Amino acid sequence: MNSVLSSVDQISRQLDRLFRSLRGCFVFELVLLLVFQLSISVTSLAAGSVNSRRGDYVISDGGSSIYGGQFTPAVLRWTEPVDGYHPEGCDNSPGLAKNLKQFGQVIPVVLMGEDSRCPLPYGRGATDVDRKFYGVGSFFYMGNDSACMSPSGIRCGATGHLVVDGDIVVTTAHTFRSIDKSRRLSDREIREFRFYSKVWIPEEMRRNKNEAYEFREYEIESVEFGGSDERNRPQEDYAFVKLKERVGQTVSPMDSSGREIRSNRRRVADDKLVRPLPFKKFDRKQVPNIGMGVGFQKDKGWEPQKNCQPFAIHDPPNGHRMGQYPGTIIVEADTNGMSSGMAYSLLVDGEPHFAGVNVGFYPDRTSLHGQFDIWNRFNWGIESNSIYDHFMEFRRKWGRN
């Protein structure tokens, strides 16, 4: 976790600038197959089709799901904590006051349809469900060459999420393509990426005593890809990343320049560790189609964003252009650039489980404004069941059962 930059503050400033102007290998119009023009990573803000007000995810005793809390007491609270804190509500779009009255309004800037994204709270404003997604993080290329950095200094970046283990991240394969999209990066270049995630810090080590979670940086040990040609085989556009250490297990304070004082490392109690998403095979038809996801978004700055309105996950219908790619799914989540690698989740036995990885959108060269259309305008990803066996094989390489 040796810092590449001189301070966490400098990292944050650079990443803020990067998010505002990102043009690298994940904010591009990459054509997977010319005939289908599947665009990668600048994932569209396709508003979901759930026709109900924003509120709680509610799971009834009978296993059926509704949204909004109209009929049963909330079991899982996603948008507002039980104690009523976080009164600004869900929307955090630039130029708009944060208040509950804006729920359901169309956001007319840089987005399409409703913007159901909102910041993932850390600390007092967080719900129990929010905390289940603290395994989210971002990958950034921190090398000093042009392999994945533009002449103006814009670096490649994407989202990733801890799954099952605290040191294994699932993301997209195209996370690790060169900035000109022409090639997969070499092993040496891939190890120039860092994974950034917010972790719990003891009070006496915090830069701000009132903020319990701070970003820390993690190095890559190994990466395994879904295949050799994700550009022509989109169902292979996933990657498993083994980090050199468990995220948040040991932490250090920062000195005045923002460097970790590694001689003063401390192990964190297990109940303070970020929790990876659980992963097992399950039948999506037997669980509520209530999708949840958290990822980084280039227009939202250095804060992970959750979809505070639930989204649906679909299999490609008969005759659909995605039907020839086994394991791909169609998703209604609101996303934008930098969200490639975001984990989809569904509720299995009342708990969010890893259900897939966000990859891209269709069609290429389309406006960000518009509504979800399962045939003509949609986000897409890779279903978890299709990569489960490969994931478990990867874990066994590291002595996991």
Image (cartoon, rainbow, N blue to C red):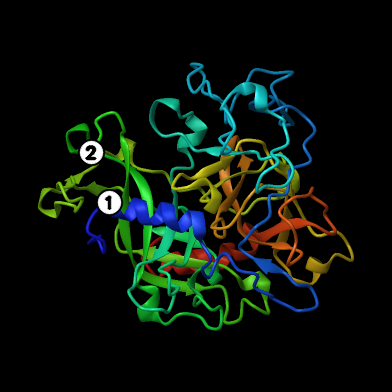
Instruction: Tell me the residue at 22%/37% (across/down).
Output: 206
Give residue 349's quadrant in the image: top right
Q: Residue 94, image x and y in percent?
A: 56, 39
Q: Quadrant of the N terminus?
A: bottom left
Residue 127, how many percent across, how many down?
49, 28
What amino acid is at disc 2? Arg
- State the separation of the CA atoms marked 2 and 1: 10 Å
**Residue behind mark 2:** 207
Q: How many marks?
A: 2
Q: Residues within 10 Å of mark 1 (few under 14, many from 20)?
A: many
Q: Quadrant of residue 326?
A: bottom right
* Residue 89 left/right relative to 165: right
**Can residue 160 be seen at all in this image of the molecule?**
no
- For badge 1, the amino acid type reads Val
Figure quadrant of the C terminus: bottom left
What residue sits right under mark 1 in the picture?
A: 8
Q: Report the disc number at residue 327.
A: none
Say whether residue 53 is left or right of residue 337: right
Q: Where 202 falls versus 88 (above or below)? A: below
Q: Kindly tell me whether residue 208 is visible in this rendering.
A: yes
Determine the secondary structure under disc 1.
Answer: helix
User: Is 140 on the left-hand or right-hand side of 294?
Assistant: left
* C-beta proximity under 8 Å, tags 2 and 1: yes
Q: Position of residue 335 (x, y in %)?
A: 63, 50
Residue at image position (82%, 68%) is: 321
In the rendered view, tell whether residue 16 sits above or below residue 78: below
The residue depicted at 73 percent of the width and 66 percent of the height is: 365
Q: Secondary structure at mark 2?
A: loop
Of marks 2 and 1, which one's residue comes earlier in the chain?
1
How many C-alpha atoms fall within 10 Å of the one at disc 2: few (<14), some, or many (≥20)?
some
Q: Residue at x 74, y 18 (%)?
A: 71
The single residue placed furthest to the left in the displayed view is 263
